[in-house]
Amino acid sequence: PLVHGTELFQAARKGHYAIGAFNTNNLEWTRAILKGAQELGVPVLIQTSMGAAKYMGGYELCKQLIEATVKSMDITVPVVIHLDHGDFEAAKEAIAAGYNSVMFDGHDLPFDENVAKTKEIVALAHSKGISVEAEVGSIGGEEDGVVGEGELASVEEAKTLAATGIDFLAAGIGNIHGQYPANWKGLHFDRLQEIADAVDLPLVLHGGSGIPQDQVEKAISMGISKLNINTECQLAFAKATREYIEAGKDKQGKGYDPRKLLAPGTQAITDTFKEICGWMGTKQVK
Ligand code: G3H
Ligand code: ZN
């Protein structure tokens, strides 16, 4: 069933596990993620970036597609439909479209404005039971046009943003969107600990793809309750698709049935989902 995010992620923070937040791009991606969650018996958050929502035909369509897919696949694990890195307008649109949860990403605004706009989104979302994520500091790299400097989150700002009434907090702790550079220094665990001590909300780790398993597990033990993964599924999809074609499994280049061409990549997303969920200690619900 579809659920709002608040209680699900509070339980994760209390229970020292995380729930996977996976980006979707289309029907295949959505089915692949839901299949993985159902097979493992774990809750899942499916999110659309603003770019993916535009690609898929808008927030209404995204919400309806995910909702209908949950129904048609007889998915019994809890599913949250979430807006990833939304600006102010996108957050309002996703709320109006009936998303279960939204992220308002105000990292590029002056901090006071980030706080003020977050408060507005919280009031609007909470009037409908919808959960809200906000961001302090920033995530390095780029995701779907959202660019960050990787600014380390300040503990004071984390406390101020948490006090707006948000349900989960994303903090910049050295994490980066996309692939990590070879000279990456790792997560700032000292800062994560300070933020976790000061804020008892579920914390969100963006840029989850490519962080070594031991760092992911340590971050979860310290309060990370939502692990965002996008690039890892894209890499797996591209690799499996390329291998299928390069091995001539597409009738030596003569095959053109889209259902066959998309199948190996789709399975690779489910496999990736299951592998990463294995690191999160996510509590099974069935
Ligand atoms: O918001 C989405 C995530 O932060 C995805 O990051 O593409 O590095 O896994 P990633
Ligand atoms: Zn992100």
Image: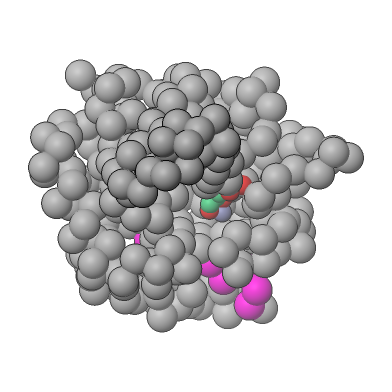
Q: Which residues are magenta?
A: 102-109
Toward the right, the furthest residue is 183
Splitting the image into 4 quarters, where does residue 131 fall?
bottom left
- Could you say which quadrant of the image residue 82 lies in? bottom left
Q: Position of residue 91 (x, y in %)?
A: 38, 71
- Residue at figure coordinates x 18%, y 60% from the top left: 64
Question: Residue at image x 23%, y 37%?
Answer: 78
> Measured from the top left, where is residue 77 in percent x and y?
21, 31
Residue plotted at (23% across, 67% down): 61
Residue at the image position 11 percent from the left and 35 percent from the top: 74
Q: Is residue 159 magenta?
A: no
61 and 154: which is toward the camera: 61
**Is 43 in front, or is 23?**
23
From the viewer's side, name the closer residue of 267 and 92.
267
Please identify the quadrant where the C terminus is shown. Answer: top left
The image quadrant where one finds ligand 2 is bottom right
Q: Quadrant of the N terminus?
A: top left
Q: Is residue 98 left or right of residue 156?
A: left
The secondary structure that most of the magenta stretch takes on is loop
Quarter of the view holding residue 139: bottom right
Vertical placement of 206 versus 276: above or below? below
Q: Position of residue 23 (x, y in %)?
A: 44, 50
Q: Is residue 106 magenta?
A: yes
Q: Is residue 123 left or right of residue 134?
A: left
Residue 284: x percent and y percent? 30, 20
Pick the front one: 105 or 116:
105
Color style of the picture: one colour
